[in-house]
Amino acid sequence: MYIRKEAVLSSQIEGTQSSLQDVLAAEAKIFSQGDPGDVGEVLNYMGLCATVCNGWKHCLFRCV
């Protein structure tokens, strides 16, 4: 949940208009006519965070 909140807040700094509720609804696929606001940008940010976190895990295991 923290990554979602971080993604929403960081994206709002850049001018997006999505809320945490919008992101959660989009993930649950509640919206039938596309995502409201800039949810796509927030979801992209979350994907980037997941990729970076996975990269760090692999890096730490290789370095140890």
Image (cartoon, rainbow, N blue to C red):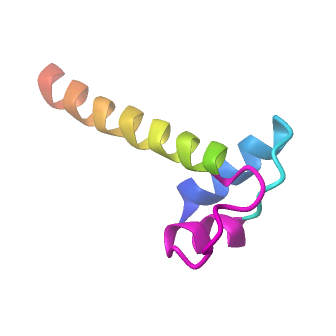
Q: Which residue is outermost to the front?
A: 33
Instruction: Give the magenta-colored segment's residue range.
Output: 20-39
Would residue 11 be found to the left or right of residue 48 on screen? right
Would residue 8 be found to the left or right of residue 17 on screen? left
- What residue do we see at 40% from left, 43% from top? 50
Q: Quadrant of residue 63?
A: top left
Q: Quadrant of residue 5?
A: bottom right
- What residue do we see at 47% from left, 36% from top? 48
Q: Quadrant of residue 57?
A: top left
Residue 32: within the magenta?
yes
The image shows residue 9, relative to residue 58, as above or below, that is below
The picture places residue 30, in percent across and down from the top left corner, at 57, 79
The picture places residue 49, in percent across and down from the top left corner, at 48, 40
Q: 34 and 44: which one is in front?
A: 34
Q: 53 and 38: which one is in front?
A: 38
The image shows residue 6, relative to residue 29, as above or below, that is above
If the image is split into quadrants, where does the C terminus sit?
A: top left
